[in-house]
């Protein structure tokens, strides 16, 4: 991998950590300007619980940077948990000298159906499900969004932008405008559920309020869109280089995600080929801003990917999130101490985290695209990366020009 990241941290631990490797030297990066606004976007949305009132996530860049520019080495990012003082004893890294009682340690013996609690306890041979849930928690996505914000910053230097919006929440389907707004995130962020359909927005908010009153939770679907992506990222030649597969893995790895669709997705399976595949047209003048090699499609059903490679059209990926597994009206479970029937633990939690999950989806797409960009164009410095990128765009234009000139193969004549 060319853009790699790791995270560490527990939901109620001292901090979340991200280590990001592969960022070329010379990327201007300021945490307050480039990372913190993304962290704040992830904290929003109607349906969040009490925790978001406690946290005010901000990233500290502690390595890999000097005078606001990356150095080419691994970046280390820290996000402190403001909730930590309330958990210092329960999550103490060292054994407690006293007060080892259940309450102080906030032990969890009633696994939640749908959560990692039970299987984690079995697999890791723990007796306290807190040892599992602390790391399984979607609090970890804070670190992903920090790592993704760095990737977004890098992509922005190449004119690639990423946005998202909620397309369904708790069964309420939004009708998206025929053309997505130019600044997708500005439009989506203006909605408390990050949707572009004002009628559906009200129904979604009502559904969330109903679910909260009923002690229940909701899921839904969001769409992530990348624009400015040049044709030819990823490859058809080997399974693990196909960008559709890499995107699906990255997005599916977000806590609570259950499905990933590209372009028409599952709907394509029910249509004849003539109603699925995007017909190809040559454009008369590709122009300097063209990233599709001088070709255009009549639709973008493919979601910007053919043969595991980007086509130059916007990348469109939809992700399905299951309802959160912490219910205030808990489901039936078993007490891990006795094997007796019981109801699952009731931990403070969100009713819906879908608007925030969409922001995490942007981060994961940014990370995959940054990786694909660095794989194709390389570069130890931003200058080298930008030069390689510009040279490839010039190659695409030259290819098209040669075709227009009647060379059927379009091969370079040195
Ligand atoms: C989460 C439970 C809640 C959420 C949390 C994810 O946390 P707490 O148990 O502290 O109330 O708020 O999400 C975040 C903290 C976050 O930053 O997104 C869970 O169990 O997954």
Image: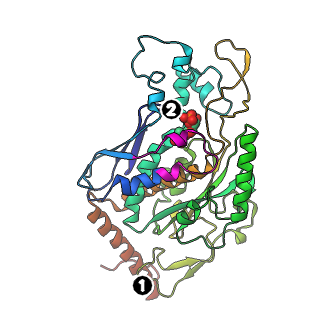
Judging depth in this view, the residue of 381 and 95 nearest the camera is 95
Of labels 2 and 1, earlier in sequence is: 2
From the viewer's perspective, tell me whether residue 248 is left or right of residue 374: right
**210 to 345, vertically: above or below:** below
Residue 196 on image: x %, y %: 64, 64
Q: Quadrant of residue 298?
A: bottom right
Q: Is residue 57 magenta?
A: yes
Residue 52 on image: x %, y %: 54, 43
Residue 36 on image: x %, y %: 42, 52
Q: Is residue 66 magenta?
A: no
Range of the magenta residues? Answer: 40-58
**275 to 361, vertically: above or below:** below
From the viewer's perspective, tell me whether residue 275 is left or right of residue 405: right
Residue drawn 38% across the image and 51% down it: 3
Local crowd at mark 2 within 10 Å, few (<14), some, or many (≥20)?
some
Q: Quadrant of residue 165?
A: bottom right
The residue where tag 2 is placed is 135
The residue where tag 1 is placed is 401
Of discs 2 and 1, which sits in the foreground? 2
Residue drawn 72% across the image and 30% down it: 330
Name the quarter where the C terminus is drawn. bottom left
Q: Are marks 2 and 1 in contact (CB under 8 Å)?
A: no
**215 to 406, vertically: above or below:** above
Judging depth in this view, the residue of 144 and 329 nearest the camera is 329
Residue drawn 56% across the image and 17% down it: 103
Judging depth in this view, the residue of 252 and 77 nearest the camera is 77
SS majority, magenta: loop
Q: CA distance from mark 2 to mark 1?
A: 54 Å
Q: Secondary structure at mark 2?
A: helix
């Amino acid at each position: 991998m060319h853009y790699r990241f790791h995270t560490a941290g527990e939901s109620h631990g001292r901090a979340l950590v991200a280590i990001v490797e592969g960022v070329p030297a010379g990327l201007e990066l300021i945490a307050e300007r480039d990372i913190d606004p993304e962290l704040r976007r992830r904290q929003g949305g109607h349906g969040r619980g009490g925790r978001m009132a406690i946290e005010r996530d901000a990233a500290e860049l502690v390595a890999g940077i000097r005078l606001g520019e990356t150095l080419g080495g691994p970046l280390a990012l820290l996000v402190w948990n403001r909730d930590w003082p309330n958990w210092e004893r329960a999550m103490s890294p060292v054994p407690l000298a006293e007060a080892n009682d259940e309450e102080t340690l906030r032990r969890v013996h009633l696994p939640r159906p749908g959560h990692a609690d039970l299987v984690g306890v079995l697999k890791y041979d723990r007796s306290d499900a807190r040892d599992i849930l602390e790391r399984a928690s979607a609090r970890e996505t804070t670190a992903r969004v920090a790592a993704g914000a760095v990737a977004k910053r890098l992509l922005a230097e190449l004119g690639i932008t990423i946005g998202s919006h909620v397309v369904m929440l708790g069964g309420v389907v939004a009708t998206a405008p025929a053309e997505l707004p130019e600044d997708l995130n500005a439009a989506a962020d203006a909605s408390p559920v990050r949707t572009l359909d004002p009628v559906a927005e009200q129904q979604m908010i009502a559904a969330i309020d109903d679910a909260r009153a009923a002690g229940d939770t909701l899921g839904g679907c969001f769409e992530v869109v990348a624009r400015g992506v040049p044709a030819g990222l990823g490859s058809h030649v080997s399974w693990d280089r196909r960008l559709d597969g890499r995107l699906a893995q990255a997005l599916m790895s977000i806590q609570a995600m259950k499905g990933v669709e590209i372009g028409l997705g599952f709907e394509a399976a029910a249509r004849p080929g003539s109603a699925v595949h995007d017909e190809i047209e040559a454009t008369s003048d590709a122009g300097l801003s063209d990233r599709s090699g001088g070709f255009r499609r009549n639709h973008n059903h493919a979601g910007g990917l053919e043969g595991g490679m980007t086509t130059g059209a916007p990348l469109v990926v939809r992700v399905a999130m299951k309802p959160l597994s912490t219910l205030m009206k808990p489901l039936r479970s078993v007490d891990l101490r006795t094997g007796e029937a019981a109801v699952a633990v009731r931990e403070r939690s969100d009713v819906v985290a879908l608007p925030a999950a969409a922001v995490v989806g942007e981060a994961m797409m940014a990370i995959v695209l940054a990786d694909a960009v660095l794989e194709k164009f390389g570069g130890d410095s931003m200058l080298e990366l930008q030069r390689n990128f510009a040279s490839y765009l010039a190659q695409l234009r030259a290819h098209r020009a040669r075709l227009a000139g009647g060379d059927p193969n379009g091969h370079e004549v040195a």
